[in-house]
Amino acid sequence: MSTTASAAAVEGEAPDTKPSLSEKQRRILDYLRSNAGAKTYFKSRLIADDLDLSAKEVGANMRPILDGDFDVTVEKWGYSSGTTWKVTV
């Protein structure tokens, strides 16, 4: 157990459970935040084009955003000519 986790347990606070995001994941999350309306659908390849990534990189880096507790909700919505993500703010 780390010193931080021990201190949090002693003080009765919950340890920080938010996943730390890589630079690519932060860029994707920022992109979704700034481009999503109340409910929007995005294709991986279109996100990739805007962020100078490959569609495969977008898909591979979506998991922490899907699993994390952020101000956007992301669901894998469909796979027809590429993965589509449903993003709700």
Image (cartoon, helix red, strand yellow):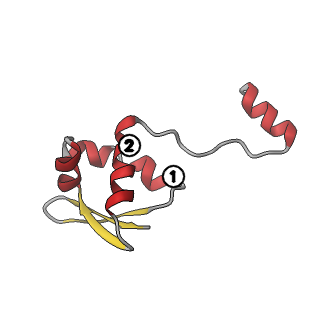
Badge 1: few (under 14), some or many (20 or more) residues near its Cα, within 10 Å? some
Q: Is residue 70 left or right of residue 58?
A: right
Q: Hey, what amino acid is under mark 2? A: Gln
Q: Is residue 50 left or right of residue 86?
A: left
> Which residue sits at x=38%, y=36%?
23
Q: Hey, what amino acid is under mark 1? A: Gly
Quarter of the image with the C terminus is bottom left
User: As displayed, is residue 52 above or below residue 2?
Assistant: below
In the image, farthest residue toward the front: 34
> Which residue sits at x=17%, y=53%?
45
Mark 2, residue position: 25
Figure quadrant of residue 27: top left
77, 51: nearer the viewer: 51
62, 34: nearer the viewer: 34
Quarter of the image with the N terminus is top right
Q: Reading the chain from its start, which is encountered first: label 1 or label 2? A: 2
43, 81: nearer the viewer: 43
User: As displayed, is residue 44 above or below residue 15?
Assistant: below
> Which residue sits at x=48%, y=53%?
67
What secondary structure is marked by label 2? Answer: helix
In the image, farthest residue toward the left: 81
What secondary structure is marked by label 1? Answer: loop
In the image, farthest residue toward the top: 3
The percent position of residue 63, horizontal first and vertical second, equals 40, 49
Mark 1, residue position: 68
Q: Is residue 12 left or right of residue 51?
A: right
Total numbered labels: 2
> Which residue sits at x=29%, y=49%?
59
